[in-house]
Image: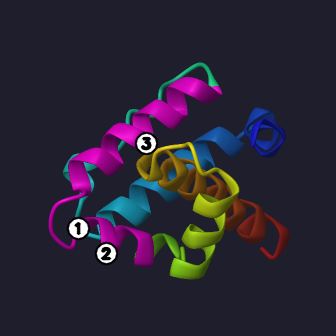
Amino acid sequence: MAEDLILLEKPGWLEKFKAQVHKDFELAGVLEYLPFLDTTTLEELQQSFYRSVLALETGHSLKNLLYRIDLTEKQIGAAAREQPGKPLQLVLAELMIKRILQKVVLKERYK
């Protein structure tokens, strides 16, 4: 995953990532659970998303957010099977970061 986040070091990409995170959380109706994005390391970013996932676990809020981010049950299941000892919430946090970064990359590529 660390190699994916190297893209965030490109000028302006971190701001685009943050804007996409804000947009996805807002459109899912869970803006109050927005992760803290002013982190300095990948581990801090993952922990921030992890805390958001933990807070959203009750009710349909997490499902709404995963749908908005465009993560499928198949993707989640595959990632969970690849990392059997890792808590599902941490797997979800990592997948969310990767998928949001993919969205930024695709927007940049096709704008």
Q: Quadrant of the N terminus?
A: top right
The image shows residue 85 at horizontal and vertical percentages of: 57, 43
Circle nearer the N terminus (2, 3): 3
Could you say which disc has been placed on residue 49 in the image? 3
19 or 62: which is nearer to us? 62
Q: Residue at x 35, y 60 (%)?
A: 25
Q: Residue at x 43, y 75 (%)?
A: 68
Q: Is residue 111 left or right of residue 98?
A: right
How packed is label 1: few (under 14 Cα within 10 Å), some, or many (20 or more)? some
State the SS at label 3: helix
Q: Quadrant of the C terminus?
A: bottom right
How packed is label 3: few (under 14 Cα within 10 Å), some, or many (20 or more)? many
> How far apart in space, not on screen, are marks 1 and 3 (Cα)?
14 Å
Residue range of the region highlighted in magenta in the rendering: 42-67
The image shows residue 32 at horizontal and vertical percentages of: 20, 49
Report the predominant secondary structure element of the magenta stretch.
helix
Q: Is residue 15 left or right of residue 52?
A: right
Q: Which amino acid, mark 3?
A: Phe
Residue marked by disc 2: 64
Relative height, residue 53 to residue 59 (above, below): above
State the SS at label 2: helix
Image quadrant assignment for residue 82: bottom right
Could you say which disc has been placed on residue 61 in the image? 1
The image shows residue 75 at horizontal and vertical percentages of: 62, 73
